[in-house]
Image (cartoon, rainbow, N blue to C red):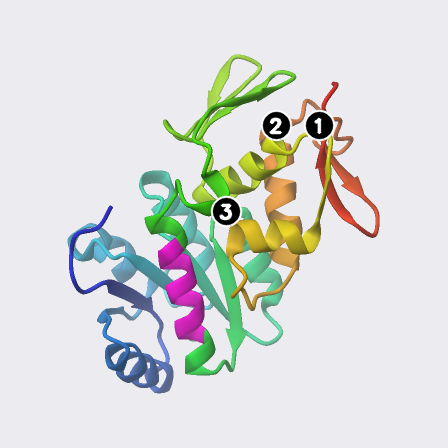
Amino acid sequence: MNTKSKQTVMVVEDEEAFIDALVVGLQREGFGVEVARDGAEALSNFDKINPDIVLLDVMLPKVSGTDVCREIRKKSQVPIIMVSAKGTEIDTVVGLEVGADDYIVKPYRIRELVARVRAALRRSATPEGESLDSGTSVSVGDVTINPEQHVVTVRGQLTKLPLKEFELLYVLMANAGRVMTRDTLIDRVWGSDYYGDTKTLDVHIKRLRTKVEVVPSTPTSILTIRGLGYKFEKLN
Ligand code: CA
Protein backbone atom coordinates (compact mmCIF):
# COMPACT_ATOMS: atom_id res chain seq x y z
CA MET A 1 0.00 0.00 0.00
CA ASN A 2 2.82 2.35 0.89
CA THR A 3 6.06 2.08 -1.02
CA LYS A 4 8.00 4.72 0.88
CA SER A 5 10.88 3.07 2.69
CA LYS A 6 10.60 5.37 5.68
CA GLN A 7 7.22 5.71 7.29
CA THR A 8 6.20 9.15 8.43
CA VAL A 9 4.58 9.83 11.78
CA MET A 10 2.78 13.14 12.12
CA VAL A 11 3.08 14.17 15.76
CA VAL A 12 0.42 16.69 16.76
CA GLU A 13 1.51 17.96 20.16
CA ASP A 14 1.96 21.33 21.83
CA GLU A 15 4.18 20.42 24.78
CA GLU A 16 7.84 20.78 23.90
CA ALA A 17 8.99 18.14 26.37
CA PHE A 18 6.77 15.54 24.72
CA ILE A 19 7.74 16.69 21.24
CA ASP A 20 11.46 16.28 21.93
CA ALA A 21 11.05 12.83 23.43
CA LEU A 22 8.79 11.69 20.59
CA VAL A 23 11.00 13.00 17.81
CA VAL A 24 14.09 11.37 19.28
CA GLY A 25 12.32 8.13 20.19
CA LEU A 26 10.55 7.69 16.85
CA GLN A 27 13.54 8.65 14.73
CA ARG A 28 15.66 6.15 16.61
CA GLU A 29 13.11 3.51 15.57
CA GLY A 30 13.55 4.49 11.94
CA PHE A 31 10.46 6.66 11.46
CA GLY A 32 10.33 10.01 9.76
CA VAL A 33 8.70 12.55 12.08
CA GLU A 34 6.79 15.71 11.24
CA VAL A 35 5.51 17.90 14.04
CA ALA A 36 2.42 20.11 14.13
CA ARG A 37 2.14 22.27 17.26
CA ASP A 38 -1.58 22.97 17.19
CA GLY A 39 -4.74 21.64 15.63
CA ALA A 40 -4.91 24.24 12.87
CA GLU A 41 -1.34 23.52 11.80
CA ALA A 42 -2.11 19.79 11.78
CA LEU A 43 -5.03 20.27 9.42
CA SER A 44 -3.30 22.72 7.11
CA ASN A 45 -0.19 20.52 6.81
CA PHE A 46 -1.90 17.14 6.66
CA ASP A 47 -2.07 16.82 2.87
CA LYS A 48 1.46 18.07 2.37
CA ILE A 49 2.93 15.70 4.97
CA ASN A 50 0.73 12.80 3.85
CA PRO A 51 1.65 10.83 6.99
CA ASP A 52 1.46 7.06 7.39
CA ILE A 53 0.10 7.51 10.89
CA VAL A 54 -1.00 10.38 13.14
CA LEU A 55 -0.26 10.72 16.85
CA LEU A 56 -2.83 13.20 17.98
CA ASP A 57 -2.83 14.94 21.34
CA VAL A 58 -6.35 15.66 22.60
CA MET A 59 -5.66 18.97 24.33
CA LEU A 60 -4.37 21.29 21.62
CA PRO A 61 -4.44 25.03 21.00
CA LYS A 62 -6.80 26.43 18.34
CA VAL A 63 -8.48 23.21 17.17
CA SER A 64 -8.98 20.30 19.60
CA GLY A 65 -7.59 16.86 18.87
CA THR A 66 -11.12 15.53 18.61
CA ASP A 67 -12.00 18.07 15.92
CA VAL A 68 -8.75 17.40 14.09
CA CYS A 69 -9.59 13.70 14.10
CA ARG A 70 -13.08 14.37 12.78
CA GLU A 71 -11.72 16.54 9.96
CA ILE A 72 -9.02 14.07 8.94
CA ARG A 73 -11.58 11.26 8.84
CA LYS A 74 -13.62 13.15 6.26
CA LYS A 75 -10.85 12.57 3.75
CA SER A 76 -8.47 9.90 5.00
CA GLN A 77 -8.39 6.45 6.62
CA VAL A 78 -4.85 7.05 7.95
CA PRO A 79 -4.35 5.34 11.33
CA ILE A 80 -4.86 7.84 14.17
CA ILE A 81 -3.73 7.23 17.75
CA MET A 82 -5.16 9.74 20.22
CA VAL A 83 -2.94 10.81 23.10
CA SER A 84 -4.53 12.13 26.26
CA ALA A 85 -3.42 13.25 29.68
CA LYS A 86 -4.74 11.41 32.72
CA GLY A 87 -8.13 12.81 33.57
CA THR A 88 -9.03 13.66 29.99
CA GLU A 89 -9.65 10.07 28.91
CA ILE A 90 -13.26 10.97 28.26
CA ASP A 91 -12.08 13.14 25.35
CA THR A 92 -10.19 10.18 23.99
CA VAL A 93 -13.32 8.08 23.99
CA VAL A 94 -14.97 10.86 22.01
CA GLY A 95 -11.94 10.65 19.72
CA LEU A 96 -12.62 6.98 19.16
CA GLU A 97 -16.22 7.83 18.40
CA VAL A 98 -15.15 10.23 15.66
CA GLY A 99 -12.84 7.67 14.06
CA ALA A 100 -9.54 7.31 15.92
CA ASP A 101 -8.13 3.78 15.89
CA ASP A 102 -6.56 3.64 19.31
CA TYR A 103 -5.55 5.78 22.23
CA ILE A 104 -2.78 6.02 24.76
CA VAL A 105 -2.67 7.91 28.06
CA LYS A 106 0.18 10.18 29.18
CA PRO A 107 2.59 9.49 30.69
CA TYR A 108 3.44 6.51 28.50
CA ARG A 109 6.62 4.62 27.81
CA ILE A 110 8.09 5.39 24.43
CA ARG A 111 8.46 1.64 23.89
CA GLU A 112 4.78 1.08 24.39
CA LEU A 113 3.97 3.95 22.07
CA VAL A 114 6.26 2.58 19.35
CA ALA A 115 4.66 -0.86 19.72
CA ARG A 116 1.22 0.68 19.24
CA VAL A 117 2.40 2.70 16.24
CA ARG A 118 3.86 -0.40 14.62
CA ALA A 119 0.73 -2.44 15.32
CA ALA A 120 -1.50 0.26 13.81
CA LEU A 121 0.72 0.54 10.74
CA ARG A 122 0.77 -3.21 10.26
CA ARG A 123 -2.99 -3.37 10.42
CA SER A 124 -3.48 -0.55 7.96
CA ALA A 125 -0.92 -2.03 5.55
CA THR A 126 -2.65 -5.40 5.41
CA PRO A 127 -6.38 -4.82 5.24
CA GLU A 128 -6.69 -8.26 3.65
CA GLY A 129 -4.40 -9.87 6.20
CA GLU A 130 -5.23 -12.44 8.85
CA SER A 131 -8.60 -11.17 9.92
CA LEU A 132 -9.85 -10.74 6.37
CA ASP A 133 -8.25 -13.79 4.83
CA SER A 134 -11.17 -15.26 2.94
CA GLY A 135 -11.70 -12.12 0.88
CA THR A 136 -15.22 -13.09 -0.09
CA SER A 137 -18.24 -11.03 0.72
CA VAL A 138 -20.52 -12.05 3.57
CA SER A 139 -24.24 -11.29 3.85
CA VAL A 140 -26.22 -11.68 7.03
CA GLY A 141 -29.78 -10.38 7.11
CA ASP A 142 -29.80 -6.96 5.50
CA VAL A 143 -26.07 -6.33 5.88
CA THR A 144 -23.44 -7.24 3.28
CA ILE A 145 -19.73 -6.76 3.75
CA ASN A 146 -17.17 -7.12 0.97
CA PRO A 147 -13.54 -7.06 2.16
CA GLU A 148 -12.12 -7.08 -1.36
CA GLN A 149 -13.82 -3.83 -2.29
CA HIS A 150 -13.91 -2.58 1.32
CA VAL A 151 -17.62 -1.78 1.12
CA VAL A 152 -20.54 -2.39 3.44
CA THR A 153 -24.16 -2.27 2.37
CA VAL A 154 -26.81 -1.81 5.05
CA ARG A 155 -30.43 -2.15 3.91
CA GLY A 156 -29.38 -1.32 0.38
CA GLN A 157 -27.37 1.74 1.42
CA LEU A 158 -23.63 1.91 0.85
CA THR A 159 -22.08 2.69 4.25
CA LYS A 160 -18.54 3.95 4.80
CA LEU A 161 -16.63 2.52 7.75
CA PRO A 162 -13.20 3.34 9.17
CA LEU A 163 -10.72 0.47 8.95
CA LYS A 164 -11.06 -0.86 12.48
CA GLU A 165 -14.85 -0.78 12.41
CA PHE A 166 -14.77 -2.54 9.08
CA GLU A 167 -12.48 -5.29 10.35
CA LEU A 168 -14.52 -5.75 13.51
CA LEU A 169 -17.77 -6.01 11.54
CA TYR A 170 -16.16 -8.49 9.17
CA VAL A 171 -14.95 -10.74 11.98
CA LEU A 172 -18.38 -10.63 13.62
CA MET A 173 -20.25 -11.31 10.39
CA ALA A 174 -17.91 -14.04 9.17
CA ASN A 175 -18.68 -15.76 12.48
CA ALA A 176 -22.38 -14.90 12.56
CA GLY A 177 -24.36 -16.88 15.10
CA ARG A 178 -21.24 -17.59 17.13
CA VAL A 179 -20.29 -15.76 20.31
CA MET A 180 -16.95 -14.01 19.88
CA THR A 181 -15.16 -13.37 23.14
CA ARG A 182 -13.73 -9.94 23.84
CA ASP A 183 -10.20 -11.37 23.77
CA THR A 184 -10.74 -13.00 20.40
CA LEU A 185 -12.15 -9.83 18.89
CA ILE A 186 -9.33 -7.65 20.23
CA ASP A 187 -6.82 -10.21 19.01
CA ARG A 188 -8.28 -10.46 15.54
CA VAL A 189 -8.87 -6.76 14.99
CA TRP A 190 -6.19 -4.98 17.01
CA GLY A 191 -3.59 -7.74 17.10
CA SER A 192 -2.23 -9.93 19.87
CA ASP A 193 0.31 -7.22 20.67
CA TYR A 194 -2.43 -4.75 21.54
CA TYR A 195 -1.80 -3.09 24.88
CA GLY A 196 -4.68 -0.69 24.85
CA ASP A 197 -7.78 -0.27 26.88
CA THR A 198 -10.53 -2.82 26.23
CA LYS A 199 -12.95 0.13 26.20
CA THR A 200 -11.75 0.60 22.63
CA LEU A 201 -13.69 -2.51 21.63
CA ASP A 202 -16.91 -1.28 23.23
CA VAL A 203 -16.61 2.11 21.58
CA HIS A 204 -16.12 0.51 18.17
CA ILE A 205 -19.14 -1.74 18.78
CA LYS A 206 -21.19 1.30 19.70
CA ARG A 207 -20.12 3.07 16.53
CA LEU A 208 -20.93 0.01 14.42
CA ARG A 209 -24.39 -0.19 15.94
CA THR A 210 -25.19 3.38 14.93
CA LYS A 211 -24.43 2.37 11.34
CA VAL A 212 -25.85 -1.15 11.21
CA GLU A 213 -28.79 -1.25 13.60
CA VAL A 214 -32.25 0.15 12.87
CA VAL A 215 -32.46 1.27 16.51
CA PRO A 216 -28.87 1.42 17.85
CA SER A 217 -29.98 1.49 21.50
CA THR A 218 -31.84 -1.83 21.10
CA PRO A 219 -29.59 -3.81 18.80
CA THR A 220 -30.94 -6.86 17.00
CA SER A 221 -27.84 -7.69 14.93
CA ILE A 222 -24.78 -6.92 17.05
CA LEU A 223 -25.68 -8.44 20.39
CA THR A 224 -23.86 -8.10 23.70
CA ILE A 225 -23.35 -11.47 25.35
CA ARG A 226 -22.89 -10.48 28.95
CA GLY A 227 -19.63 -11.57 30.51
CA LEU A 228 -18.38 -13.04 27.24
CA GLY A 229 -18.33 -10.76 24.26
CA TYR A 230 -20.40 -10.06 21.20
CA LYS A 231 -22.33 -11.96 18.58
CA PHE A 232 -23.66 -11.03 15.18
CA GLU A 233 -27.18 -12.49 15.18
CA LYS A 234 -27.86 -14.76 12.26
CA LEU A 235 -31.60 -14.25 11.98
CA ASN A 236 -32.93 -10.74 12.18
CA1 CA B 1 -1.52 19.18 24.86
Q: Earlier in the sequence, mark 2 or mark 3?
A: 3
Residue 198 horizontal/vertical position (percent): 65, 60
Q: Earlier in the sequence, mark 3 or mark 1?
A: 3
Determine whether label 3 and label 1 are within 8 Å by CB.
no
Single out the residue that lies furthest toward the top.
156
**Residue matched to label 3:** 98
The one of 166 and 66 positioned closer to us in this rendering: 166
The answer to if 116 sits in the magenta stretch is yes
Picture residue at 29% right of the left edge, 77% below the top: 26
Residue 212, which numbered label?
A: 2
Position of 95 relative to 177 (above/below):
below
Relative to 48, 20 lies left or right:
right
The amino acid sitting under disc 3 is: Val
**Location of residue 54 by image quarter:** bottom left
**Residue matched to label 1:** 221
Q: Let me know if residue 142 appears in the view.
A: yes
